[in-house]
Image (cartoon, rainbow, N blue to C red):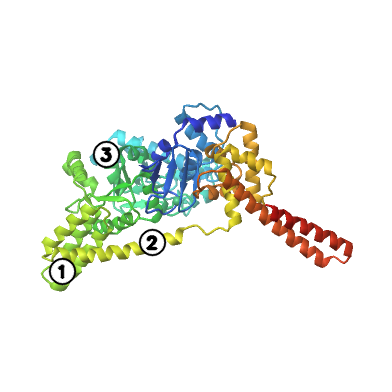
Amino acid sequence: MNNNIIDEIRSKLDIVNVISSYITLEKKGRNYFGLCPFHDDHKPSLSVSPEKQIYKCFVCGESGNVFNFVMNYEHLSFNETINLLAPMAGVSLNMEVKHDDKYDKYYNMMNLANDFYQNNLNSREGAKARKYLLERKLDQETIKTFNIGLSLNKRDVLTNMLMSKGMSLEDLNDIDLSNTNHDAFINRIMFPLHNANGKVIGFSGRIYNGEDLNKYQNTKETILFKKRENLFNYHRARDEIRKCKSVIVMEGFMAVIRAYTVGIKNCIATMGTALSVEQLNLIKKLSNNIYLCYDGDNAGHKATLANGEQFLKAGVNTKIIILNNNLDPDDYIIKYGAEAFQKLIDNAISYTDFKIKALKSSYNLSNVNDKTNYVNQVLLEISKEKDEIKREIMLKNLASETDVWYNTLEKKLFSMLEKEEKHDKLDEVVVKPKKQNGLNRAMDSLVYYMLNSPEAITFVDDSSVYIPDKPIRLIINEIIAYYNKYGKISEADFYTYLMDEKELLEVLKRILSVNYPEYSKEIIEENMKAIDNYNRTLEIKKLENLIKEETDITEQIKLMDKIRNLKLKEEKE
Ligand SMILES: [Zn+2]
């Protein structure tokens, strides 16, 4: 691809705009900060520089320009990233994206099956299912939006159809469209399940006429369908979630579809009460404001407590939408309407408040032991709250509710917070990068200064200093070549330049993830001297070894002369 176009795209995009469409950024001083999506981040460690148009994470070391961010975030190739970003930059591209997906044949089968099921629903054989959907208040538009379909009451129609198109039975069994050589889904309303990129990876089938032990049948775990890595409606809700800066996490996909029909479109579903780490990270990527809206039964209550705790630990603002009377969001909206549901959203309480409520109902506060346990548990929850004012209000509530003296509670809370702080400090020590020796630091900083000051490039180029580390030597050569070619250089453009050099790119990321002092001529000279000294010491050691092996005395004298000259040079400097 043409380098000029790529640089044009990059220069027309603002990295702060692009990144903040994925994660929440907050301005602090000259830079913006947010939770790093590339490691399990609990404090905002990712900094984005509008001046330099780059981002870096001070914990995991991930860094780069706007292309690197989108590539890593969306798991795209460089070409796919350019195609995605070009329209945003207002640059038109006349080329095709080549992508080579080994799962293409499987996705193809899924698409054919998806079409087939939808056609069935519209056919004569689908009349009963259509009537059922209408009774469940799912209109034509919703059916279309969610690609709802129907598997027929026949054993082999889908399998035969796909095999007639040249698909192998083995492949069909692999992705659970067929099961032991027959259609996996029979006589069910079919809801396609998509991955984060919007590709169909499986189905959930619901019974609609007749009886079956299982109301829902889901595609089992296959090479495409990995339950813990996917969320229902993720690809469809993504834009809406970013727009309204919050996401509602539900238990079942029918709840999500129902909310969509009444215009609440920022919902996704975990498809069950369990929340996996992978799902949590996917959700975190979209928003820092999460509403948990699980079913109003006992299982939903338990899941809210467990999953809310996970979100809290992940540093996400978590609110709870409370549904009573064993209702799920689907039933609730049908029974009480959209406005009532919107009110529930508006009245959502913080996870901490929810947990304290739950604690209260599980203790008998007229019993001294129970009351003590309750107070300690609540204090533990209050200690997790970051806002001081909120902590004070909660403490006051606890004091009046339990008749324990406010000062006693406050004292206990402070000692808890102190312990927490010590623990945090320990954590920080662990994540700090390994101490580098002087030589490595000197080489790294040369790269940094060359990318930030043309004067440094000239110094290094003129000095003929030999860089002992091969990747860094190559990077420095590339910087000089780049500068000679374009007459200027920036960190952001150089990231693109190295895009195809995976190994060098990793080294560059490592180098640039650290902070360096302000550029000065003296710093460059000092660093080059450190590298020179290292080279000379190494050279002297080599010569000394040669002398030991040398038998000819005149040769030995020659070598000793060389060593003396090297040592003289060192003294002169
Ligand atoms: Zn990170």
For the residues bearing labels 1 and 2, Cβ distance under 8 angstroms: no
Q: Name the one closer to the observer, 396 or 268.
A: 396
Residue 342: x %, y % from top left: 20, 41
Find residue 371 and name its label: 1
Q: Secondary structure at mark 2?
A: helix
Q: Which residue is mark 2?
A: 425
Q: Which residue is mark 3?
A: 264
Tell me which amino acid carries mark 2.
Lys
Label 1 – label 3 distance at C-alpha? 41 Å
Label 1 – label 2 distance at C-alpha? 32 Å
Residue 166 lies in what quarter of the image?
Answer: top right
Q: Counting other residues with Cα less than 10 Å from the Cα at mark 2, is it few (<14), some (14-19), or many (20 or more)?
A: few
Q: Earlier in the sequence, mark 1 or mark 3?
A: 3
Tell me which amino acid carries mark 3.
Ile
Considering only vertical position in the picture, is 430 above or below 294? Answer: below
Evaluate whether residue 213 shows in this view.
no
Q: Counting other residues with Cα less than 10 Å from the Cα at mark 3, is it few (<14), some (14-19), or many (20 or more)?
A: some
